[in-house]
Image (tube, rainbow, N blue to C red):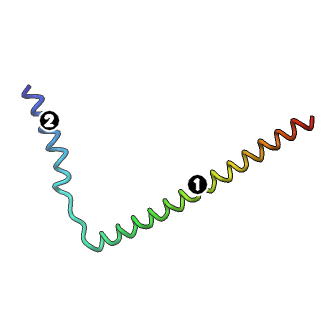
Amino acid sequence: MKRIILALSLSATLLVLPFSIAQTPNSAEQVKMLALIKEVQTQQAQIADNQAKIEIRLADLAEAIHVARIYSARAR
């Protein structure tokens, strides 16, 4: 039982230790970080928009192929 408590307390100490040592960023770094976050969010929005456009085009293409197969089957 003592080994379990010792192991748990040691792992909790090792888990908390890196957070207590971390430095707080200064305001210039925070401004840069916020600018980077905004840029990444903008890029993600563009990627999502492009993905939606791609899916629409693929659906149109699949429908065109489906119709072409129907017409080619009727022609035989």
Residue at the image point whose x is 82% and y is 39% from the top:
69
Q: Which mark is residue 8?
A: 2
Indicate the position of residue 22 as horizontal and vertical percent values.
20, 58
Relative to 69, say whether 34 is above or below. below
Residue at the image point whose x is 21% and y is 64% from the top:
24
Q: Secondary structure at mark 2?
A: helix
> For residue 25, which quarter of the picture?
bottom left
**Foreground: 37 or 7?**
37
Label 1 vs label 2, nearer the camera? 1
Relative to 49, say whether 1 is above or below. above
Indicate the position of residue 28 as horizontal and vertical percent values.
29, 74
Q: Is residue 30 left or right of residue 45?
A: left
Hey, which residue is sitting farthest right in the picture? Answer: 76
Name the quarter where the C terminus is drawn: top right
Residue at the image point whose x is 49% and y is 63% from the top:
43
Earlier sequence position, callout 1 versus callout 2: 2
Residue at the image point whose x is 17% and y is 48% from the top:
16
Residue type, label 1: Gln
**Foreground: 45 or 17?**
45
Residue type, label 2: Leu
Hey, which residue is sitting farthest left in the picture? Answer: 2
Indicate the position of residue 10 as horizontal and vertical percent values.
13, 39
Q: Which mark is residue 51?
A: 1
Circle 1 residues within 10 Å: few <14, some 14–19, many ≥20: few
